[in-house]
Image (cartoon, rainbow, N blue to C red):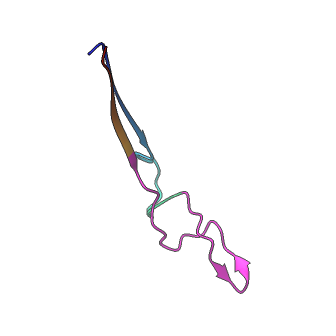
Amino acid sequence: MSKARVYVTGQNLFVLTDYTGFDPEVNTPLAFGGNLSYGIDFAAYPRARTFLVGVNIDFD
């Protein structure tokens, strides 16, 4: 083994806000009376947290 690399990355790990709902980035495209109502929280699921861990090993 000549080289080894370990990496870790994450997306949407935490949000700092006083918002009391699931997701402060509300974007649920529901329509009332034919009008789209973006920006209104209809108890949509929050965005997923993503974790990625990997190892890269080179052998000579």
21 or 30: which is nearer to us? 30
Q: Main secondary structure of the magenta part?
A: loop
Q: Residue at x 30, y 12 (%)?
A: 2
11 is higher (above) or lower (below) than 40: above
Q: Which quadrant, please, contains the C terminus?
A: top left
Q: Which quadrant, please, contains the N terminus?
A: top left
- Describe residue 30's horizontal placement relative to residue 54 as left or right: right
32 is higher (above) or lower (below) than 39: below
Q: Which residues are magenta?
A: 25-50
**Residue sitting at the far front:** 60
Expressed as whole percent of the image width and height from the top left, the position of residue 13 reads 40, 45
Q: Residue at x 73, y 79 (%)?
A: 35
57 or 18: which is nearer to us? 57
Q: Residue at x 52, y 74 (%)?
A: 42
Number of disc labels: 0
Expressed as whole percent of the image width and height from the top left, the position of residue 20 reads 44, 62
- Residue 10: quarter of image: top left
- Describe residue 56's horizontal placement relative to residue 42 as left or right: left
Q: Residue at x 40, y 48 (%)?
A: 50
